[in-house]
Amino acid sequence: LAALSLYRPEYLGVHDKESSKTPKGLEQSVMTVPLHHKLNAVYSFVKSHLKSKTIIFLSSCSQVRHIWQIFCTLQPGIPLMALHGKLKQDTRTKLYFDFLQRP
């Protein structure tokens, strides 16, 4: 796609010279569940990983806001942040750096 849409595209590699492409402490998980089990599965995952910093990707801004509101009501025992594209850039940046600073 890049070859079709870009004039002289250049590849920029962030970790090309390192032995590991991702940080050694990063653990990635993927769950595929039926739609009617999605909320329960995500909540169970969060509850079972209370000692970990977790980022959960969702399909839309409205899903992020909806799940964030529900989880805030359920109080899973960890701080929750909703980061999505409809937030102003400075708010998104602040949330991101707040996430990085948390233990």
Image: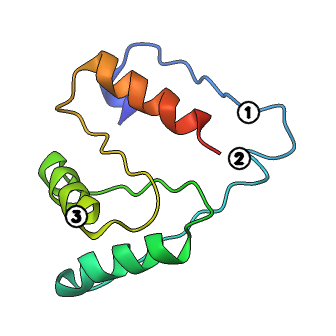
- Residue drawn at x 62%, y 63% is 51
- Quarter holding the C terminus is top right
Q: How crowded is mark 1: few (under 14 residues within 10 Å), some or many (20 or more)?
A: few
Query: Which numbered disc flags the more N-terminal residue, 3 or 2?
Result: 2
* Residue assigned mark 2: 22
Nearer to us in this view, 26 or 22: 26
Residue 60 at x, y = what percent? 18, 51
Nearer to us in this view, 51 or 58: 51
* Residue assigned mark 1: 15
- Residue drawn at x 27%, y 70% is 74
Residue 62 at x, y = what percent? 12, 51
Residue 30 at x, y = what percent? 48, 71
- Name the secondary structure under disc 2: loop
Q: Is residue 97 above or below residue 83?
A: above
Q: Is label 1 in contact with label 3 (beta carbons under 8 Å)?
A: no
Q: How far apart are marks 1 and 3 (CA)?
A: 40 Å
* Residue assigned mark 3: 73
Q: Is label 1 in contact with label 2 (beta carbons under 8 Å)?
A: yes
Q: How crowded is mark 2: few (under 14 residues within 10 Å), some or many (20 or more)?
A: few
Could you say which disc has been placed on residue 53 in the image?
A: none
